[in-house]
Amino acid sequence: MTAESAPGGSRVTVLGEALIDLVPGTVPGTFTAAAGGSPYNVAIGLARLGVPTSLMARLADNALGRILRGGAEAEGIDLTAAPLAAEPTTLAVVSLDAQARASYDFYHQGTADWQWSADELSRVPESTGVLHFGSLASWLPPGDERILDLARRVRARGDVLVSYDPNVRPTLLRDPGRGRALVERAVRIAHLVKASEEDIAWLYPGRSTAEVARQWLALGASLVVITDGGRGAGAFTGPGLVIHRPAVEVMVADTVGAGDSFTAGLIAALIRRGRRSPLGLAGLPAGDLAAVLDEAIMVAALNCRHIGNDPPTAADLRAALAARAS
């Protein structure tokens, strides 16, 4: 699909990196290789929630790349727009603190995820109705400019919802001023922006979440959603609507993939309510927005009950929502 062809469809296309997380093993000093990367995790979450999903990620032609490709195919994710890359797979070494919160050290120089060509990015599936992008691929050269150009052209069509998650990584961005500039250029392109309270605090020290959300809305977003871990999530809209929903109490194994599961839950909940278009998102009423946040929070909470990224299925989500309601 070119950015000028085909009306928006029913598919979510996720664009960005797919990498290998080296997760601490049960024996100190050992690690387990797990498929990861924020866009890859979002695609897994969407597929498990029953959303037709395509992944645009450059998957290396090596053993680690085959782990990524096999994992996505096992979830029913369409990989026709995922190029076979000659470069090696990106690695992220995961550390967990006392609260099971994850941090990452990246080995990313010259790896597959950032080497996008214009031809590779021309292969957006025809049935795409939502384009989600973000994370490291949206601000690491040389591919970031081409990704942003594609997202601009898709937004200009007017019938495809563009979603963005900066997924801030301070060790790679290094300077908040540089990070703000990189993030804000992407916010200008997106209809839906999701970020975390930690992202906001690092990018905009001393400023409130509400103030930053209003700034992002002024830049062009229709809906800004900010997650805040155990305190839930808040949503801000262009017409001035502000909604906050509480977190769900669960026994936390770790938080790996929680934000990505939230993003998948958010997009899936919008689609289920017929709000996958830019116009539908802009007109989202307060009751629907609260319900969308509740579903996304529940998806993230269910993921946190497991070690590593392991988002729930649609059946898991229905059962958990029913149990909470009763």
Image (cartoon, rainbow, N blue to C red):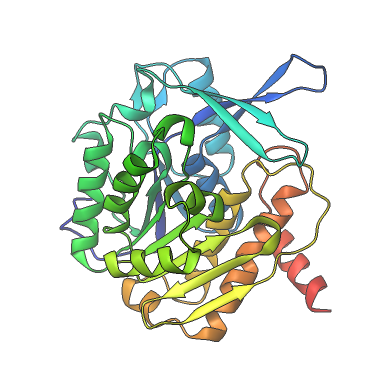
Quadrant of the image for the C terminus? Answer: bottom right
**Residue 27 rendering spot, x and y as whole percentages:** 82, 17
Q: Residue at x 41, y 58 (%)?
A: 11
Q: Residue at x 70, y 50 (%)?
A: 303
Instruction: For residue 226, say whether it is visible.
Output: yes
**Residue 302 rendering spot, x and y as whole percentages:** 73, 55
Instruction: For residue 313, say whether it is visible.
Output: no
**Residue 283 rendering spot, x and y as whole percentages:** 39, 83
Q: Nearer the viewer, residue 135 or 274?
A: 135
Q: Residue furthest front?
A: 206
Left or right of 168 on screen, residue 81: left
**Which image quarter: residue 126?**
bottom left
Compared to residue 61, the image places residue 78 above or below, namely below
Compared to residue 244, the image places residue 53 above or below, namely above
**Residue 286 rendering spot, x and y as whole percentages:** 52, 85
Compared to residue 255, the image places residue 114 above or below, namely above
Q: Nearer the viewer, residue 272 or 206?
A: 206
**Which image quarter: residue 247?**
bottom right
Q: Residue at x 63, y 68 (%)?
A: 295
Q: Residue furthest left?
A: 4
**What is the number of callouts on the image?**
0
Q: Nearer the viewer, residue 14 or 79?
A: 14
Left or right of 23 on screen, residue 208: left
Q: Residue at x 52, y 15 (%)?
A: 63
